[in-house]
């Protein structure tokens, strides 16, 4: 008899269950709108051309070996990551107030942040507030470090937009100094972000209540195609003088999902505190992964630190708009924006009941369609269309060949 007989069978991860069911489906019309990974217009995973170039450079580099990276990661990578998140002219960078550590993608950065907060923020029992709804993994990550969790209102079911009043009043009534986990851009799963005016209101309350901002930024540049626009909230909070955490992922904006490339940043009030905090997080990192993986960080570092490659990934100047096809970030983000428009147009043409402007208002990888559980089930059973029960679709799963099919299917299950 096993000493672990009492262990209960856990349910499979929702997203991976959807992919398995999709894979097993024999229909030629099948559509997978579950997993949050970019697909090109033919429905295939896309290796960014700039990543291929960086890869070739690394292969030719005879000075590289397989030695361990430092515990905090590849310095050229963490430094470039900080410039990306906080801006090249960031005062916080100049004043050495940021502790940056390479992490196992965005998930690892979230975990490192949660672990640090549980050990060093007050008594470790200060509650963390998560948006309702949020990325399902947030709950597991914070539960693992035994931090009490609460929800704050986020999605307004009627308007399918932000419930700003609910959000602000939750911040008002939370105990002073609570942790608030905010999605820096392209909220998952809703695709609904605060406007800049709303971010100002959020910052006002958080400052007055001395809440701690924990910013999860998994889609910078991927959401709008504009790094500054998507990074606005981060830079605004830093300018306001908050101490905060930023979790960065390069899964989406570099298409490096499986390489697990991310970065954790703690922005502190002064260089001295940042240094102490970094030393403690290094100990946490050491006990969990010892040293972060090298390959993905080298790819990202090669691109971010080379002007020509960087411009191919992302060109700031709109005067160069005509080169957009070869700007990798814009190609991905604009294909998704284009799909939002096409989907909306199809609904208009079909006269599908209800309002659909939320499809084009929402941003990033996901859209909260407003479809209910029953409709989602019908789409799967009758049309071979796969998505999560809450009606979230991954926009990246739509393309020129299936967007009309999807719109018609939705139209039918709604009527
Ligand atoms: N946070 C959010 C809100 C996300 O949507 C994701 C990606 N699904 C992540 C973090 C991190 O993903 P990864 O660990 O693959 O970078």
Image (spheres, rainbow, N blue to C red):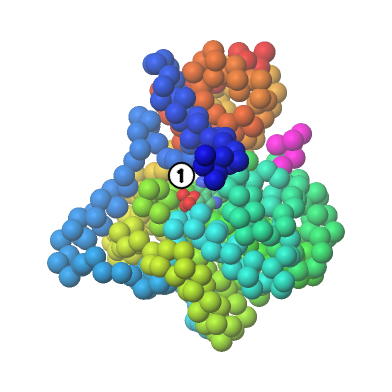
**Which residue is painted at 58% across and 31% down in the image?**
388
Q: Tell me where residue 266 appears, x and y as whole percent.
A: 56, 71
Total count of labels: 1
Q: Which residue is mark 1?
A: 333
Q: Quick check: can you spot residue 413?
A: yes
Q: Quick check: can you spot residue 394?
A: no
Q: Tell me where residue 292 appears, x and y as whole percent.
A: 38, 64
Query: In the picture, which quadrant includes the C terminus?
Result: top right
* Residue that protrudes farthest toward the right in the picture: 173
**Which residue is painted at 36% across and 52% down in the image?**
259
Using the image as rendered, state which of residue 384 and residue 237 is in the foreground: 384
Using the image as rendered, state which of residue 312 and residue 238 is in the foreground: 238
Magenta residues, start to end: 155-160
Residue 20: quarter of image? top left
Residue 147: quarter of image? bottom right
Q: Main secondary structure of the magenta part?
A: loop
Asked if 225 appears above or below 293 in the picture, the reply is above
**Which residue is painted at 49% across and 58% down in the image?**
108
Q: Tell me where residue 180 appears, x and y as whole percent.
A: 69, 60
Q: Is mark 1 within 8 Å of ligand 1?
A: no
**Which residue is painted at 55% across and 44% down in the image?**
4
Q: Tell me where residue 412 appears, x and y as whole percent.
A: 60, 13
Q: Residues within 10 Å of mark 1 (few under 14, many from 20)?
A: many
Q: Secondary structure at mark 1?
A: helix
* Residue that protrudes farthest toward the bottom in the picture: 272
Q: Is residue 277 magenta?
A: no
Asked if 180 appears above or below 47 in the picture, the reply is below
Asked if 263 appears above or below 4 in the picture, the reply is below
* Residue that protrudes farthest toward the front in the picture: 1
349 sits left or right of 374 in the view: left
């Amino acid at each position: 008899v096993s000493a672990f007989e009492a262990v209960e069978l856990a349910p499979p991860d929702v997203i991976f269950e959807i992919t398995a069911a999709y894979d097993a489906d024999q229909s030629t019309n099948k559509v997978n709108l579950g997993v949050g990974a970019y697909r090109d217009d033919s429905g295939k995973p896309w290796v960014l051309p700039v990543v291929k170039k960086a890869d070739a450079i690394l292969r030719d580099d005879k000075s590289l070996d397989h030695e361990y990276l430092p515990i905090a990661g590849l310095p050229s990578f963490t430094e470039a990551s900080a410039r990306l998140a906080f801006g090249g002219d960031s005062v916080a960078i100049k004043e050495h107030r940021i502790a940056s550590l390479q992490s196992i993608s965005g998930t690892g950065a979230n975990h490192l942040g949660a672990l640090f907060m549980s050990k060093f923020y007050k008594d470790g029992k200060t509650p963390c507030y998560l948006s309702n709804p949020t990325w399902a993994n947030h709950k597991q990550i914070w539960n693992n470090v035994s931090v009490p969790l609460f929800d704050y209102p986020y999605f307004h079911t009627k308007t399918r937009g932000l419930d700003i009043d609910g959000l602000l009043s939750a911040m008002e009534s939370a105990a002073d100094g609570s942790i608030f986990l905010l999605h820096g851009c392209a909220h998952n799963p809703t695709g609904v972000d605060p406007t800049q005016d709303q971010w100002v209101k959020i910052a006002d309350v958080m400052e007055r209540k001395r809440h701690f901002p924990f910013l999860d930024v998994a889609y910078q540049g991927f959401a709008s195609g504009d790094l500054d626009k998507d990074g606005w909230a981060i830079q605004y909070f830093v300018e306001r003088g908050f101490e905060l955490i930023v979790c960065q992922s390069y899964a989406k904006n570099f298409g490096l999902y499986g390489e697990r490339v991310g970065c954790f940043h703690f922005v502190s009030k002064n260089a001295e505190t940042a240094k102490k905090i970094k030393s403690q997080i290094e100990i946490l990192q050491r006990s969990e992964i010892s040293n972060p993986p090298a390959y993905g960080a080298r790819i990202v570092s090669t691109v971010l630190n080379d002007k020509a490659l960087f411009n191919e990934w992302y060109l700031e100047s709109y005067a160069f708009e005509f080169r957009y096809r070869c700007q990798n970030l814009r190609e991905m983000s604009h294909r998704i924006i284009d799909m939002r428009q096409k989907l909306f147009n199809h609904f208009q043409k079909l006269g599908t009941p209800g309002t659909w402007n939320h499809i084009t208002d929402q941003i990033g990888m996901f859209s909260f369609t407003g479809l209910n559980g029953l409709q989602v089930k019908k789409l799967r059973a009758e049309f071979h269309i796969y998505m999560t029960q809450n009606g979230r679709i991954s926009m990246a799963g739509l393309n020129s060949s299936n967007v009309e099919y999807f719109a018609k299917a939705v139209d039918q299950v709604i009527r």
